[in-house]
Amino acid sequence: MTPERNLHRLLSSIAPKRHTGVYLFCEVPSGGVPEGIDPQMTFREGDTTTVVVEEDQAEAAGLAGELPSVWITLGASSDLAAVGFLAVITARMAAQSISVNVVSGYRHDHLFVPVAMAEDAMAVLSSLEESHQSIEQLLSSGIDRLCETVEIRPATFEDAQALSELWERSGLGLGSTDVVPEMQACLRLYAELFLVAMAGATLAGSVWATYDGRRGWVQRLATDPEYRGHGIGSALLAEAERRLAGLGAKKVNLLIEPANAPIAGFYRRQGYESDDLLFMERFLPSSADAPGEVRQG
């Protein structure tokens, strides 16, 4: 099987397999693995070696191990140079307060999670796989084969300029000087909720979701005009919703400015409804403003 780099294909084929037995992390002198020990993993750290072995082997050898864990193998054949695969998985585990230790083999990735969290970890992996299988179906239903090459991944600071240009072309102008500081604030909280869609080397779409502990919010959903009509916006929104649900959000809100009112039809097709609310806002003074000065906009 050819190793895969495409993030969505990897996430849609996680195929987690839980192995039998309980495994411990133990430390032994380098070169001094005891007789009778058949480690599942070894890693040399200076003058000691970390070994992951089955619990009964560790006890028989008198090794004091830590973190009794279940071993889960991910069936996806991930390329060692694949970007974002394990980051998405560990972020989703963290959102559910599941500790996970990752080991990457030549062909597959392996997770060691505490025994008490094994069922929850398998549920997270299965849910993640199912959600990305749905996205793969959305992307493959486009007008041509463009969307088969689209990759949705978390945004990085290196995307700031391309995002600024995308939003300008999409009528969601945000000054380029504002993008990086706002990204910094967002990525500190929930980096996995700020997503971009890449068509090859081109940043073709974005969605910027946030979570306040009760509701999810969606903003900056945009598709480059040249890439519209291929389901990219729908796929971005669906992925943002799934990630918000994974964090515990029961409801997703969004705001549409009057000048962008025609986009309401798109959201209605995605299941959103309008509500009669009184929206109020206040811009807080920044550190660069004079005392008592509130910026307008």
Image: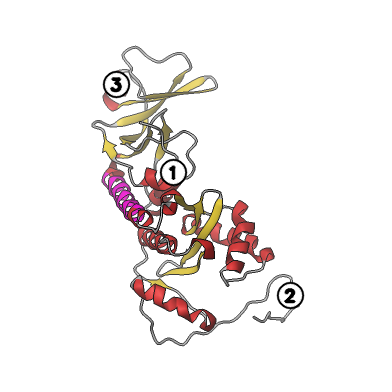
**Residue identified by numbered label 3:** 57
Magenta stretch, overall SS: helix
Viewer-closest of 207 and 287: 207
In space, the residues marked 3 and 2 are separated at their CA atoms by 65 Å
Name the residue furthest left: 20
Q: Earlier in the sequence, mark 3 or mark 1?
A: 1
- Please state if 91 lies on the left or on the right of 37 as rendered: right
Quick one: SS at disc 2? loop
Q: Residue at x 50, y 69 (%)?
A: 219
Q: Are marks 2 and 1 in contact (CB under 8 Å)?
A: no
Viewer-closest of 183 and 76: 76
Residue type beneath disc 1: Asn
| Count of picture labels | 3
The answer to whether residue 53 is visible is yes
Q: Residues within 10 Å of mark 3 (few under 14, many from 20)?
A: some
Residue type beneath disc 3: Gln
Q: Earlier in the sequence, mark 3 or mark 2?
A: 3
In space, the residues marked 3 and 1 are separated at their CA atoms by 38 Å
Residue type beneath disc 2: Asp
Q: Residue at x 41, y 29 (%)?
A: 105
Q: Mark 3 or 2, which is nearer the eye?
A: 2
Q: Residues within 10 Å of mark 1 (few under 14, many from 20)?
A: many
User: Which quarter of the rendering shows the C terminus?
Assistant: bottom right
In the image, which disc is placed on residue 67? none
- Please state if 73 lies on the left or on the right of 236 as rendered: left
**Residue identified by numbered label 2:** 289
- Please state if 188 lies on the left or on the right of 101 as rendered: right
Viewer-closest of 277 and 120: 277
Q: Which residues are magenta?
A: 119-136
**Residue identified by numbered label 1:** 6
